[in-house]
C-alpha cells in the first residue's frame, strides 16, 4: 500500500519552489503580439497545461521576471482565486518557456526523484488536494496562506520512479484520449460553422455559379443554389431566397425552474444560460434542441444533442412550419447579436419580442434539408465523442486516487522471452 512508500517533503524532491510576479509587474498594457506566453487559470483546467489563447509579454520583460519563468517539466499551482488548480508543463508543450501570473506559484521537480506528471496527479487526488488546501482561507478572495513556504514543508508518499512512470502512463493515456476527442470536436464544430458561413452568409456557391466558376460542391447539390442575386432589405441575397423575421422561423419557449437541490441522479443534461449546468432524471424537452440564454448570459445559443431540461434562465427553440431545421436555426441564432436585445432590468436579459423582430434569411427547403443532414451528422459525431469523454472521465476519477494511494498496484507488461538460439 501507499503507506509503505517513504515520505518526502516537497523541498526534498524539488530543485525550486517559487512565486509568480507581483500584481503590478504584468499589466494589460504590457501585453504584446508575440513573445513569452503568460499562464493564467484557464490554462490549468486539466492536469497538464492547456496550450490555448495566451497573452504575451516581451522577452525583455520576461527576463526581468526571471524568478517567474517556467519551463517544460515544471508544475504550476494557483494560490489565490480558483485555488487548487495544478498542471504540469509537458515535454511536447507549444512553447519552451512561459511566465506565470501573480496568482500562481510553481515547483521545479528533481526528476531523479519525482516525475512532474506524478506530482501533478498526486495533487489532483483527494489526499493531495486536501493537503494543498488545508492552509487555505475562504475570507475575501480564497487563497493559500504563504503558499511557497507551506508547500515546501508538505510531506508526500513517493513510490519508486518506475512505479511513478506506470501511474503517469495509465492516467496520461486517458488524458491523451480525452484531449484527442476534445480536439476532434473543435474541428467538427468548426466545420459546421464554416459550412453555414460559406453557404448562408458568404453565398460562395451562388457567387461561383454567377461568375461561371465551379461551385465546389457536387452537381446534385449545386443545382439547389441559384446563379444570380437580387436586392433585399438585407442587401444582395441569392435569387429566390426570402427575408423573414426571426419570429416567423421559431418560438422561444420558457425553460422551467429546477434548483440544484431538486435534481435527481440521471442522464438528462440540464442547461442554464451559458451551457450545461448539471444532470437530472427527467426531461423537459425531447431532443435534439437549441437552448438560448435568457437571464445572466442572454443570447448564448447552445446545441442540446439529446433530451434535455432547460431551466428558467433560458429559452428553448420551437421551430415553425416554414423552417423545420433546428441545425439551421441554431447557426442563425449564433450569428445574431441577441445579447444586444436586452430587457430593461438590473439582471441582463434577452427580450424575446425584440429578438422576434430581427431579420433572417430563409433559403429553399430542399437546401435547408441538405444542410440539416450534414450538420446533424457532424453533431452526432461530436455527441459520441462527448459521451466517450464522459466515460473516460469517470474511469480516470475512479483510478486516480487508487493509483496514487497505492491501493491499486500496476506492473509493466511482461514481454515473452525469445527462444534460445
Image: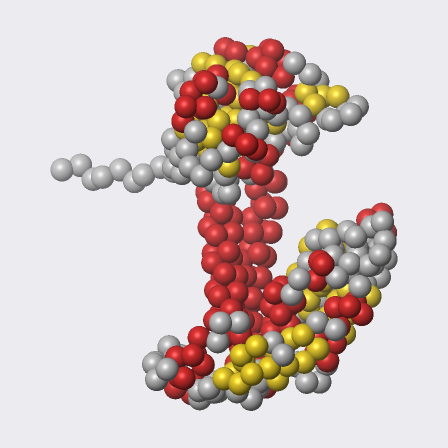
Q: Residue at x 67, y 74 (%)?
A: 359
Question: Is 245 left or right of 186, judged from the image as shown?
Answer: right
Q: Residue at x 52, y 26 (%)?
A: 100
Q: Judge whether 175 appears above or below 406 on screen.
A: below
Q: Residue 323 location in percent, x, y?
A: 66, 81
Decide which of 207, 86 is in the foreground and name it.
207
Q: Residue 98 location in percent, x, y?
A: 45, 29
Q: Residue 124 location in percent, x, y?
A: 60, 31
- Asked if residue 78 can be seen in this view, the reply is yes
Q: Residue 221 location in percent, x, y?
A: 44, 84
Decide which of 392, 103 is in the foreground and name it.
103
Question: Is 246 left or right of 160, judged from the image as shown?
Answer: right
Q: Residue at x 68, y 20 (%)?
A: 144
Pick the quarter of the image with the C terminus. Answer: top left
* Residue 112 lies in quadrant: top left
Looking at the image, which residue sits at the far left? 421
* Residue 22 lies in quadrant: top right
Q: How is the image coloured?
A: secondary structure
Decide which of 2, 396 is in the foreground and name it.
396
- Asked if residue 366 can be seen in this view, the reply is no
Total labels drawn: 0
Pick the quarter of the image with the N terminus. Answer: top right
Decide which of 20, 134 is in the foreground and name it.
20
Q: Residue at x 61, y 31 (%)?
A: 85
Q: Judge whether 38 appears above or below 267 on screen.
A: above
Q: Judge whether 375 appears above or below 119 on screen.
A: below
Amino acid at each position: 500500500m501507499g503507506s509503505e512508500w517513504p515520505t518526502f517533503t516537497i523541498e526534498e524532491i524539488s530543485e525550486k519552489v517559487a512565486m509568480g510576479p507581483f500584481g503590478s509587474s504584468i499589466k494589460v498594457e504590457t501585453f504584446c503580439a508575440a513573445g513569452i506566453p503568460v499562464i493564467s487559470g484557464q490554462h490549468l483546467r486539466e492536469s497538464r497545461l492547456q496550450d490555448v489563447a495566451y497573452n504575451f509579454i516581451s522577452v525583455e520583460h520576461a527576463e526581468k521576471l526571471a524568478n517567474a519563468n517556467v519551463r517544460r517539466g515544471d508544475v504550476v499551482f494557483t494560490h489565490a482565486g480558483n485555488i487548487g488548480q495544478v498542471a504540469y508543463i509537458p515535454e511536447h508543450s507549444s512553447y519552451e518557456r512561459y511566465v506565470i501570473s501573480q496568482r500562481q506559484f510553481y515547483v521545479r521537480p528533481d526528476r531523479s526523484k519525482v516525475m512532474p506528471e506524478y506530482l501533478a496527479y498526486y495533487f489532483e487526488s483527494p489526499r493531495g488536494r486536501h493537503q494543498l488546501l488545508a492552509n487555505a482561507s475562504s475570507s475575501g478572495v480564497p487563497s493559500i496562506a504563504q503558499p511557497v513556504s507551506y508547500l515546501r514543508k508538505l510531506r508526500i508518499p513517493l513510490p519508486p520512479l518506475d512505479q511513478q512512470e506506470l501511474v503517469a502512463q495509465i492516467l496520461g493515456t486517458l488524458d491523451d484520449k480525452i484531449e484527442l476527442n476534445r480536439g476532434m470536436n473543435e474541428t467538427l464544430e468548426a466545420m459546421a460553422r464554416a459550412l453555414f458561413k460559406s453557404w448562408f452568409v458568404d453565398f460562395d456557391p451562388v457567387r461561383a455559379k454567377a461568375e461561371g466558376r465551379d461551385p465546389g460542391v457536387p452537381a446534385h447539390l449545386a443545382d439547389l443554389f441559384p446563379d444570380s442575386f437580387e436586392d433585399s432589405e438585407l442587401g444582395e441575397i441569392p435569387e429566390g431566397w426570402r427575408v423573414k423575421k426571426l419570429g416567423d422561423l421559431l418560438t422561444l419557449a420558457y425553460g422551467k425552474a429546477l434548483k440544484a437541490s431538486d435534481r435527481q441522479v440521471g442522464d438528462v443534461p440540464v442547461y442554464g444560460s451559458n451551457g450545461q449546468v448539471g444532470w437530472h432524471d427527467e426531461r423537459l424537452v425531447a431532443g435534439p434542441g437549441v437552448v438560448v440564454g435568457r437571464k445572466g448570459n442572454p443570447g448564448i445559443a447552445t446545441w442540446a444533442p439529446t433530451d434535455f431540461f432547460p431551466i428558467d434562465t433560458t429559452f428553448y427553440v420551437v421551430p415553425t412550419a416554414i423552417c423545420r431545421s433546428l441545425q439551421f436555426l441554431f447557426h442563425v441564432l449564433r450569428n445574431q447579436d441577441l445579447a444586444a436585445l436586452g430587457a430593461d432590468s438590473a439582471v441582463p436579459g434577452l427580450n424575446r419580442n425584440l429578438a422576434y423582430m430581427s431579420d433572417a434569411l430563409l433559403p429553399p427547403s430542399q437546401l435547408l434539408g441538405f444542410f440539416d443532414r450534414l450538420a446533424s451528422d457532424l453533431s452526432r459525431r461530436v455527441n459520441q465523442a462527448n459521451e466517450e469523454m464522459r466515460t473516460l472521465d469517470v474511469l480516470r476519477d475512479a483510478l486516480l486516487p487508487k493509483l496514487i494511494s497505492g491501493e491499486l498496484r500496476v506492473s509493466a507488461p511482461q514481454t515473452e522471452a525469445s527462444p534460445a538460439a
